[in-house]
Image (cartoon, helix red, strand yellow):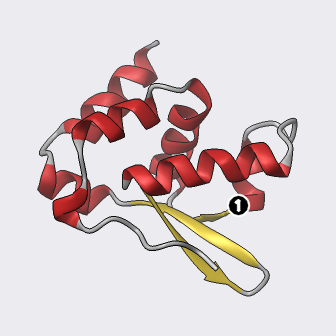
Amino acid sequence: MIAQHPALDQLRVENILSALGNPIRLRIARILAEDGELTCGAVGVHLGGQLSKSTLTHHWRVLRDAGVIRQQPSGRENLLSLRREELEERYPGLLSTILDSAGQD
């Protein structure tokens, strides 16, 4: 069972920045920004398949709890997607600026 995603008014910039301050989580966000909705397994493949399921689960939880991603059950897997529109509504330009800056590094 997936925990509740934070509501729009519960999103906090410090939680978003903290979640995206980790290089792996930032890479996950960039993958989802480029490829759209993906299964957990597909994101793991994009990351090189070198991270354990428990490590990936931890990263999904941090991103979900910060409000960066949405996790939705789909059969035996979960689909991951960026909450781009909601983040843009709450903090205009924040996600785009972070992702664009990360792409230049």
Name the residue furthest bottom.
75
Query: Could you tell me which residue is drawn at 72 percent across and 47 percent down?
Result: 56
State which quadrant residue 9 falls in: bottom left
Q: Secondary structure at mark 1?
A: helix
Query: Could you tell me which residue is drawn at 62 percent across and 31 percent down?
Result: 24
State which quadrant residue 84 falls in: bottom left
Q: Is residue 10 left or right of residue 2?
A: left
- Locate residue 81, reporting x and y percent: 49, 62
Comparing 14 with 96, the one in front is 14
Comparing 72 with 15, the one in front is 15
Evaluate whether residue 102 shows in this view: yes
Q: Is residue 27 left or right of residue 105?
A: right
Residue topped by disc 1: 40
- Locate residue 97, reporting x and y percent: 25, 30
Comparing 84 with 60, the one in front is 60
Relative to 49, does residue 87 appear above or below in the rendering? below
Query: Could you tell me which residue is drawn at 34 percent across and 40 percent down?
Result: 16
10 Å crowding of disc 1: few (<14), some (14-19), many (20+): some
Q: Amino acid at mark 1?
A: Cys
